[in-house]
Image (cartoon, rainbow, N blue to C red):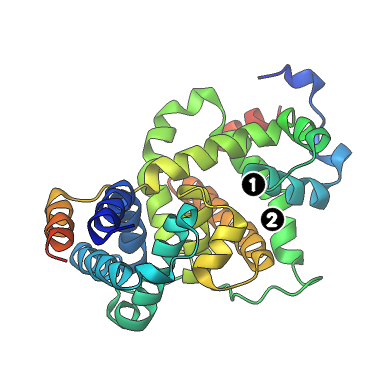
Amino acid sequence: MTDSEAKAWFSRGIEECMDSLYGLALRLTRNNANAEDLVAESVAKAWSALATLEDKERFRPWLFRILHNCYISEYRKKSVRPVEYGYDDIVVDGQEDDITGFLIKQPDDFLNWWGNPEREFANSLLGEDIVSAIQMLPEAFRIAVLLVNVEGLSYDEAAEVLGVPPGTIRSRMKRGRTLLQKALWQHANEAGLITDDLERGSKS
Amino acid sequence: MKDSKDKPQIDEIGCLEAINGLYAYLDGEMNDPESIAKFECYSRTELETALGELIRKSAKGKAPEKLQNRLRKLIDGI
């Protein structure tokens, strides 16, 4: 590939990934200006490091990895840090009882309620609520949810982005989903969107 | 969408197995066609799929035009 071909190929790849890069940067930095700077800096770094891209089919995870590394090394300290849910990132087999209990019971209540077609008006509120809930996830879970759920990466690709084993991505997805559902369920309760009647109705 | 009366309920599958399998299914990490078929007719799958879709739509980014122009200029200049 000549230099101009490489540049044209790189340019097309960046065009296709712009929205994803910005979305990830915004959810990581929680600040528009920092997100834009982070994306621009990552794209510049990616061009300089293009020779290290071994598999052109894996351009997106490679690019996301550069953005994530750039965030860790230069932007994390500057980021706005709201109160995050108090869950650590250490997942030990056999020590997931609290999470498992919630996964088994509460999300079913939440999902049954949420999936009720009569709750259309409440569904329209949930877009913003979901973004707030994502923003409050501890970083390790937030980035896993963003990469897998939002950007559609496989566990292997997400593992490559974060430099962790695929099993760690599986654990983080499980906890991230649970925390999100718990936050949305609590929000719905606090906002009065769930009444006793509705709860009973959702279970019938 | 299949008839809800025919769907296996969570207790019949085994809760923890169901949750682990469900998440593997949702994230495209399940390869066994028989298991995939089982989860395709599991009521919670439909709801988690819908929630996953809402998460995707809500959290998807859109690069501002200012950033798009900045990136194009940056690439032009390299």
Q: Are marks 1 and 2 in contact (CB under 8 Å)?
A: yes
| Viewport quadrant of the N terminus of chain A | bottom left
Task: Give the residue drawn at x 43%, y 49%.
Answer: A130
Q: Which mark is residue A177?
A: none
Say which residue appears at 38% left-offset and 34% top-offset: A124
- Say if labels 1 and 2 share a chain: yes
| Position of residue A144 measured from the top left corner of the image (x, y, whole percent) | 52, 61
Give the number of callouts. 2
Give me the disc on residue A107: 1
Q: For mark 2, what is the residue?
A: A102
The C terminus of chain A, quarter of image: top right
Query: Residue B42 at what x, y percent from top left?
Result: 74, 32
- Asked if residue B52 shows in the view, the reply is yes
Q: Earlier in the sequence, mark 1 or mark 2?
A: 2
Q: Is residue A115 left or right of residue A63?
A: right
| Residue A134 in the image: above or below residue A163 | above
The residue positioned farthest toward the top in the image shown = B3
| Residue A85 shows up from this direction | no
Circle 2 marks a residue in which chain?
A
Mark 2 surroundings within 10 Å by alpha-carbon count, few (fewer than 14), some (14 through 19), many (20 or more)? some
Chain of the residue that carries numbered disc 1 in the rendered image = A
- Circle 1 residues within 10 Å: few <14, some 14–19, many ≥20: many
Q: Is residue A39 above or below residue B42?
A: below
Tag 2: residue type? Phe
Secondary structure found at label 1:
helix
Q: Amino acid at mark 1?
A: Pro
Looking at the image, residue B32 sits to the left or right of residue A168; the answer is: right
Task: Determine which quarter of the picture holds residue B47.
Answer: top right
**Foreground: B36 or A186?**
B36
